[in-house]
Amino acid sequence: MESHSDEKVHTRTISVTTRDGGDGRILVEGTLQDERFATSYVITGETFPTGVIHHMAVRVRINCANLMIEDVEVDLLHVPREVCLETRNCLDAVKGLTISKGFTVKVKKLAGGAKGCAHVVELLVAMAPAAIQGFAAQRSRKPVEISSDEAKMVSRFLINTCHAWREGGPFADLLKKKFSLP
């Protein structure tokens, strides 16, 4: 794709880190940072200088037995407006939610729109697949035998998530055969 200019105007950086939370849990922390490289004149008449316009962190504690969010914490480290700080607790509504199919829709229903901050919601949604990877990394640090029930749970997260794990593909078939899954 051809660029008309090499001048950078905006960068969004999202980072997700998973840590061992002990007692069958993982702690997942995500950060989102937006940086603008030119002064911004917005529709409200406000002017924002160059630099960081959004910087936020979301931390969740996830139970590895069922991938349920047990706790959530939001830090609004840098926001463009004071009123944005009122959304600090917008993700409290996702406590008890399981990371599974439909997660994005549920999060947006519970915390999106006028109920919350679009950037915080977007960050949590981006964290979900990374949390699954973190769960897998945590789980696979030692060889373990998994039960048929655990294999069913894992298959719900993997099957049809990509070409390699497509229904009828070699990995889905291997998982189904190994654990006698339907």
Image (tube, grey):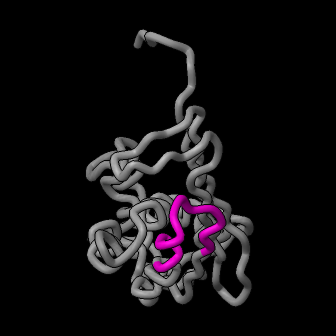
Q: Residue at x 35, y 42 (%)?
A: 163
In the image, residue 132 lies at what x, y percent?
52, 65
For the question of whether residue 170 can be seen, the reply is no
Camera-nearest residue between 176 and 52: 52
Camera-nearest residue between 43 and 85: 43
Camera-nearest residue between 56 and 147: 56
Q: Is residue 154 left or right of residue 21?
A: left
Q: Residue at x 50, y 80 (%)?
A: 147
Q: Is residue 82 magenta?
A: yes
In the image, residue 82 lies at what x, y percent?
53, 70
Q: Residue at x 64, y 77 (%)?
A: 26
Determine which quarter of the picture holds residue 164. top left
Does residue 71 sit above or below 153 in this rendering? Answer: below
In the image, residue 59 lies at what x, y percent?
61, 74
Magenta stretch in the rendered image = 75-86
Q: Is residue 137 magenta?
A: no
For the question of whether residue 28 can be seen, the reply is yes
The quadrant of the picture occupied by the N terminus is top left
